[in-house]
Image (cartoon, rainbow, N blue to C red):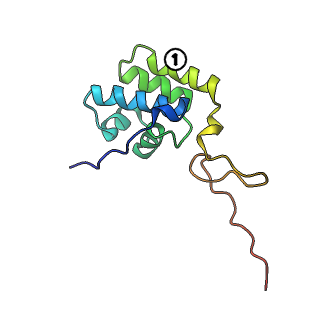
């Protein structure tokens, strides 16, 4: 039995709406994330993060997913719209001034913070 999917929040912003639409197309085709990820040659965890708007979606991934899901360009148009409305950097939690951008949204954790010597 698969994991219970997280509830999506399409009204939270354009990338959340795109992720919601991706899930709707995937579920309409009766595909699991794993099955779609295999077909699209995308890591399953990335696909889940795309759906939850936790990871930037490369345009080539949107094109591939649109093609596999036979979405007739809807996912590509949605990607274009989301890119215009909110750049992909907006997927992350907005950092405080002076705070480093780190975490899965940006793909690297960066160097460990330096600790002052006692």
- In the image, 103 versus 16, the foreground residue is 16
* Quarter that holds the C terminus: bottom right
Residue furthest to the left in view is 1
Q: Please provide percent x and percent y for residue 9.
A: 45, 37
Q: Is residue 7 above or below residue 112?
A: above
- In the image, 38 versus 91, the foreground residue is 91
Residue furthest to the front in view is 11
Q: Residue at x 55, y 27 (%)?
A: 59
Q: Is residue 71 above or below residue 21?
A: above
Q: Residue at x 64, y 23 (%)?
A: 84
The reply, left or right, for residue 112 in relation to residue 118 is left
Disc 1: which residue: 77
The reply, left or right, for residue 15 in relation to residue 113 is left
Q: Please provide percent x and percent y for residue 15.
A: 53, 32
The reply, left or right, for residue 94 in relation to residue 98 is left
Helix, strand or loop for disc 1: helix
């Amino acid at each position: 039995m698969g994991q219970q999917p997280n509830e999506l929040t399409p009204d939270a912003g354009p990338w959340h709406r795109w992720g919601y639409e991706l899930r709707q197309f995937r579920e309409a085709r009766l595909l699991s994330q794993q099955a779609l990820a295999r077909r699209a040659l995308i890591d399953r965890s990335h696909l889940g993060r795309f759906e939850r708007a936790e990871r930037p979606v490369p345009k080539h991934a949107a094109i591939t997913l649109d093609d596999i899901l036979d979405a007739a360009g809807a996912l590509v148009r949605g990607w274009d719209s989301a890119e215009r409305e909110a750049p992909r950097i907006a997927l992350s939690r907005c950092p405080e001034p002076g705070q480093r951008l780190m975490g899965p949204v940006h793909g690297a954790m960066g160097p460990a913070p330096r600790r002052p010597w006692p």
